[in-house]
Amino acid sequence: MEALLSQPETMRMNPPEDLRTRLLNQTSGWQMLPDIAVKALAMARDPNCSIKEFSSVIERDPKLATEILRITNSAFYAARSPIMNLKQAVTRLGFAHCRNVILAASLGSAMRKLPLAEAWMQLVLWRHSVLTGIISMSINREFSLGFLGEEFTAGLIHDVGRSLFGVIAPTNFAAADPLDFEESGDFLQRERDILHTDHCELGAWFISHNKLPDALVAVVACHHVPTAAPEEHLKLVAATAVADHMANYLQRQGSADGYDPEANVAIESLFSDRRRDDYYRVAHVIMTDALREANSPNGAFALH
């Protein structure tokens, strides 16, 4: 994680034009957000939109509707009773929270369909995304950070640039990103030396091109350098960076045993000294619970 603070404190969003062109060509026909999701997100911002209208639009996409219900019925939403339909979900969560659930469901589905050359890469990266998202949710809940689901979406999308490397540069992927989830040394510079961009820059440009929210663009661009994020997005970026460090350890070791929470320097951008001590006490529990949820075959975020 030491490399996190060694990078220039700017948002990089200008990958080489030839890479941008290649990426757009190879993802043509692939949608980051389905049309129904785009419409529902717009409706959720309309103060005059009714729950009935909103739900009826989402129901036109059965796969999206099913994914939303899976997420809202997960243990992390701690529903007192099962949510049986979309109207119940909207009533219980509210429009703002539902917007983020729609984003999470849509982006999760889209990322699993990215045309990577090697299926195993997709599985490994998806596992990391899910773990980061679940840990982010737990941190939000444990420390009352005030997020309404955007922290899970941020966790899912933060490393999208790594998946995009697998789309546009499969032959150079292993050299640029060995998928060892180690962050020692200047790994972003290694990516730039080989691919002339890094996963943060490429991913941020791509999701900005796809008109995703600015907060998510900041997360993708700055999760290795939270202090480079715009002030209004710093808390979300820092929470994602903290969760990313924890998820990386779980990827490498398979459990929270031996994890040193004080090595997670991103925590300095998220918490005061007093709250850091609280984080140090609960980090192992958060990681263990996240791993259990991710590995549960019946969980909302099951890794399959």
Image (cartoon, rainbow, N blue to C red):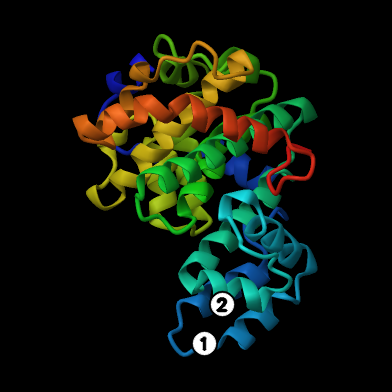
Residue drawn 26% across and 36% down? 271
131 or 288, nearer to the observer: 288
- Describe residue 93's horizontal placement relative to residue 26 as left or right: left
Q: Is residue 221 visible?
A: yes
Q: Quadrant of the C terminus?
A: top right
Residue drawn 49% across and 65% down? 97
Which residue in the structure is indicated by mark 2?
91
Question: Is the residue under label 1 in contact with that under label 2 (CB below 8 Å)?
Answer: no
What amino acid does circle 2 point to?
Answer: Thr
N-term mark: 2 or 1? 1
Q: Is residue 14 visible?
A: no
Q: Quadrant of the N terminus?
A: top left
Tag 1, which secondary structure? loop
Labels in figure, total: 2
- Describe residue 277's horizontal placement relative to residue 80 as left or right: left
Residue 100 sits above or below residue 254 on the image: below
Tag 2, which secondary structure? helix
- Describe residue 162's horizontal placement relative to residue 29 as left or right: left
176 or 105, nearer to the observer: 105
Which residue in the structure is indicated by mark 1?
49
Residue 202, image x and y in percent? 49, 37
